[in-house]
Amino acid sequence: MRGGSPAKRCTSRGEIGSHPQDLAQRKIKLAGSPAVDGGPQIDLNRAGDSFFLKASMKVGVPGVDREVAQELAEAAHGVCPYSKAVHGNIEVETIIS
């Protein structure tokens, strides 16, 4: 936003940030390494005469509350170059495992 402060958002944990990347920029000590379990699954679907793709990924973040893990996954999805490239073209579901 020009000439002023950026819009604020309130996370599900009651914290306030100006961008989804705020959570990714916070320092969080992890007990283990975050992982995508088995890689993404890509499905080819059909609706009438049209085809479309849908992706799903199982993400694990050991030692982190599920709610925080979900927010981390969403923040990562927001800054990922591949996610940006397919935004609006492929539905992506993130499953916290």
Image: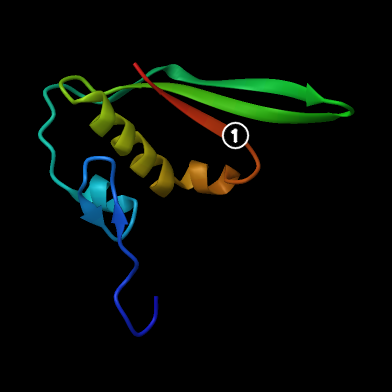
Report which residue position mark 1 lands on. 91
Q: Picture quarter containing residue 68?
A: top left
Looking at the image, which is closer to me, 27 or 95?
Answer: 95
Q: Nearer the viewer, residue 18 or 57?
A: 18
Instruction: Decide if residue 89 is on the left or right side of residue 75.
Output: right
Q: Quadrant of residue 54?
A: top right
Q: Answer with the quarter of the image where residue 33 lies.
A: top left
Q: Is residue 86 above or below residue 53?
A: below
x and y percent of residue 41 in the render?
54, 19
Helix, strand, or loop for circle 1? strand
| Residue at (87, 26) in percent of width and height | 48
x and y, in percent, of residue 18 in the image: 29, 61
Instruction: Work out whether 19 lies above or below 92.
Output: below
Nearer to me, 43 or 74: 74
Q: Quadrant of the N terminus?
A: bottom left
Residue 64, compared with residue 74, is above or below; it is: above
Q: Residues within 10 Å of mark 1 (few under 14, many from 20)?
A: some
x then y, percent, for residue 38 = 43, 14
Picture residue at 28% right of the left edge, 46% below the top: 11
Q: Where the C terminus falls, by quadrant? A: top left
Q: Residue at x 42, y 40 (%)?
A: 77
Q: Is residue 63 or residue 36 the one in the foreground?
A: 63
Whole-percent x and y of residue 39?
A: 45, 20
